[in-house]
Amino acid sequence: MVLRIVCDVFFLIGLIFALAGTLGILKMPDTFSRMQASTCVSTLGTLGVCIGGVLYAAIGMHSASAAVKIAVIGLLILITNPIGSHVLARGAYKAGIRPEKKMETDDLGRDFDE
């Protein structure tokens, strides 16, 4: 019973982060802000669900193989989401999309000799 409540709390945390990411995509002013909101929040939301799933699979179902699979999925998302977001941001910058506000430091501009 207690395990189920703990798992549900982690699932709820994942849901809240996913909802916040969706609202961030709708409310942020430019491409880079929307990309940051969607990447960070989707990573945290997925990790919340993965932690709940690992706990439920390992302790509730007594299935170590399912828990390991869920943990590997969470680890891959934790690694690939930020890398993919970074590559998309660099591609958008190279394509000519710029933030609405002037940046203090423009590291991407330095990388592209601007």
Image (spheres, rainbow, N blue to C red):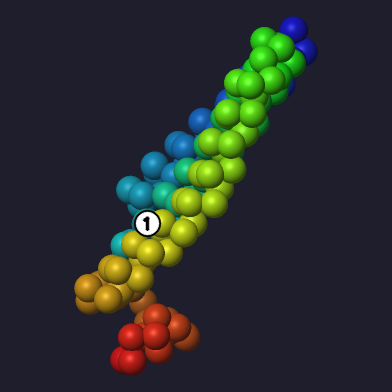
Among all residues in the image, which is located at the extreme top? 1
Q: Which image quadrant for residue 71?
A: top right
Query: Looking at the image, is 30 positioned above or below residue 109?
Result: above
User: Which quadrant of the figure has residue 108?
Assistant: bottom left
Left or right of 29: which side holds 104? right
Q: Residue furthest right?
A: 2
Give residue 62's position: percent from left, percent from top: 71, 12
Query: Could you tell me if residue 10 is visible in this image?
Result: no
Which of the pair 35/65 is nearer the observer?
A: 65
Q: Position of residue 14 (x, y in %)?
A: 55, 33
Say if residue 113 shows up in the picture.
yes
Secondary structure under badge 1?
A: helix
Q: Residue drawn 74% across and 16% down?
A: 59
Task: Report whether 97 appears left or right of 99.
Answer: left
Indicate the position of residue 78 as horizontal and vertical percent values: 56, 47
Split into 4 quadrants, where in the image is the N terminus?
Answer: top right
Mark 1 neighbour class, 10 Å CA radius: few under 14, some 14 to 19, many 20 or more: some
Residue pictured at 51% horizontal, 44% vertical: 77
Residue under label 1: 34
Question: What's under tag 1, amino acid-wise?
Answer: Arg
Furthest-left residue in view? 95
Q: Residue at x 60, y 21 (%)?
A: 66
Name above or below for residue 12 compared with residue 106.
Answer: above
Give the quarter of the figure containing the C terminus.
bottom left
Tell me if 26 is positioned left or right of 51 in this view. left
**Residue 75 to residue 40: above or below:** above
x, y percent for residue 45: 53, 38
